[in-house]
Image (spheres, rainbow, N blue to C red):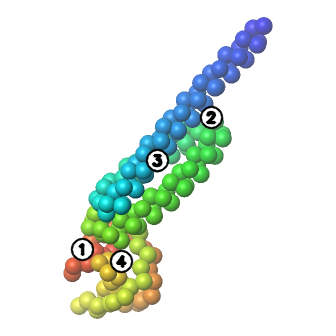
Amino acid sequence: MNRLKTALTILMLYITVAGLVTFSLFILEEAFQTAMFGTWPAQDARRWDLVKIGSDVMESNLTAMRWVTYGLGWVQPLALLSYHHYAKSAQSYIDSLRSKVLAHRPDLFLGEQVTLELSPKAFTELPDGSILKTFGQVGVIIRPEDNRRTFSLSGRLEVFQGFYVIDTRR
């Protein structure tokens, strides 16, 4: 009888801890989705500042979710697997949303690390021999030997000659 009582106590402790982990992840998921739902009317209203704030909130929620998932998720392996994949999908949504904001209001990302996918339409040779390639309001400054047609690059967004650029010369 004592063994059964001990086994039930251990089982109850496990269920309690697993439940705390899973419930915390569920609340973080709900917080993420609430921020995501808030970005939809902001996009309709073309309030890119609010969409950017929403994407920042989602990123913060996702960071917390990853901490809980990878720190404690092993307690409940199904939750670990589920929330690992939820985090991957959520990151994809954030990346897409930020891309949309960047296309409409690049100024909201000044000084931040961004990733650009560009097929520049125009170019200007700069006095130091480097090249400014632009697509709309956004561009990239490259060395002459890096004369690609398309660019996928990350860096800090700056203003240069009226364009929002990532300077790859650094």
Q: Are marks 3 and 1 in contact (CB under 8 Å)?
A: no
Mark 3 or 2: in front is 3
Which of disc 4 and disc 1 is earlier in sequence?
1
Which of disc 2 and disc 1 is earlier in sequence?
2
Q: Quadrant of the C terminus?
A: bottom left
Residue 80 vs residue 95, the one in the foreground: 95
Q: What's the distance in space between the residues labelled 1 and 2, CA to CA?
A: 48 Å
Q: What's the distance in space between the residues labelled 4 and 2, CA to CA?
A: 44 Å
Q: Amino acid at mark 2?
A: Val
The answer to whether 105 appears left or right of 16 in the picture is: left
21 shown above or below 81: above
Q: Are marks 3 and 4 in contact (CB under 8 Å)?
A: no
Residue carrying label 2: 75
Residue 82 pos. (x, y %): 62, 46
Task: Describe the element under mark 4 as helix, strand or loop.
Answer: loop
Q: Amino acid at mark 3?
A: Gln
Residue carrying label 1: 159
Q: What's the distance in space between the residues labelled 3 and 4, CA to CA?
A: 36 Å
Residue at the spot x=36%, y=55% of the render? 41
Q: Quadrant of the N terminus?
A: top right
10 Å crowding of disc 2: few (<14), some (14-19), many (20+): some
Q: What's the distance in space between the residues labelled 3 and 2, CA to CA?
A: 24 Å
Task: Describe the element under mark 2 as helix, strand or loop.
Answer: helix
Task: Describe the element under mark 1 as helix, strand or loop.
Answer: strand
Q: Amino acid at mark 4?
A: Thr
Residue carrying label 3: 33
Residue carrying label 4: 168
Residue 100 pos. (x, y %): 39, 67
